[in-house]
Amino acid sequence: MPQNPEDPGVRENRSADVLADESETMLSTQLETEVGDPTFKVDIVVSDIGKVAVYHSRPFRKKLAWLEFDLETRRMAFIMDDGDARDFGAPVPGHLAKNMQNAHQVLMVLLDEAGEPKAGQYYPLIVHRS
């Protein structure tokens, strides 16, 4: 994916993606690791109409229940069945956060070793507004 010159951590994806038809622009950002696992990569993708997908390179250690996103801090938390929360430490870039304000669900996509989609499932998204 080409880099966004305004923010080198953000890549533009203009392909016909799982979330987008040809009229949508997809923007994404990579959050580096799950706590303690440097091989765990997360890529957040948001369409210009607010569809959200999270691509992850490895399964979560615990069962995911829902996601929460705080518009003010631009932080996304992954909430597990037992109440444990995973925060990857990097804020979602502002232009992605703006498109997330009306989202209600996230498509979580597990990638295989080659980076191809292996499995996907929708999870609820709770958006916190101040």
Image: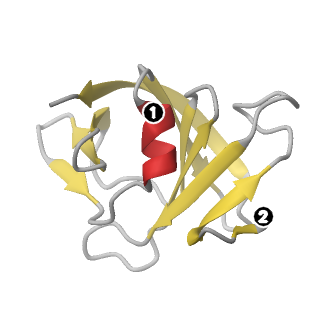
What secondary structure is found at the residue carrying circle 2? loop
Please, what is the three-letter code of the amino acid marked with disc 1? Met
Q: Which residue is mark 1?
A: 100
Identify the residue at image location x=43%, y=51%.
94
Could you say which is closer to the camera, residue 50 or residue 83? 50
Q: Earlier in the sequence, mark 1 or mark 2?
A: 2
Q: Is residue 15 above or below residue 37?
A: above
**Crowd rating for badge 2 (residues with CA inside 10 Å; few <14, some 14–19, many 20+):** few
Q: Is residue 110 above or below residue 35?
A: above
Q: Which mark is residue 20?
A: none
Most distant residue in the left direction: 83
**Crowd rating for badge 1 (residues with CA inside 10 Å; few <14, some 14–19, many 20+):** many
Between the C-alphas of marks 1 and 2, the distance is 21 Å
Q: How is the image coloured?
A: secondary structure
Q: Position of residue 121 (x, y in %)?
A: 53, 29
Could you say which is closer to the camera, residue 95 or residue 116? 95
> Is residue 57 among what the camera can see?
no
Left or right: where 37 falls relative to 21: left
Q: Single out the mark in the foreground, 1 or 2.
A: 1
Residue 33 lies in quadrant: bottom left
Left or right: where 90 falls relative to 128: right
Q: Which residue is mark 2?
A: 1
Q: Position of residue 98 (x, y in %)?
A: 45, 37
What secondary structure is found at the residue carrying circle 1? helix
Could you say which is closer to the camera, residue 39 or residue 8? 8
Identify the residue at image location x=20%, y=34%.
81
Left or right: where 83 falls relative to 63: left
Identify the residue at image location x=44%, y=69%.
40
Please, what is the three-letter code of the amino acid marked with disc 2? Met
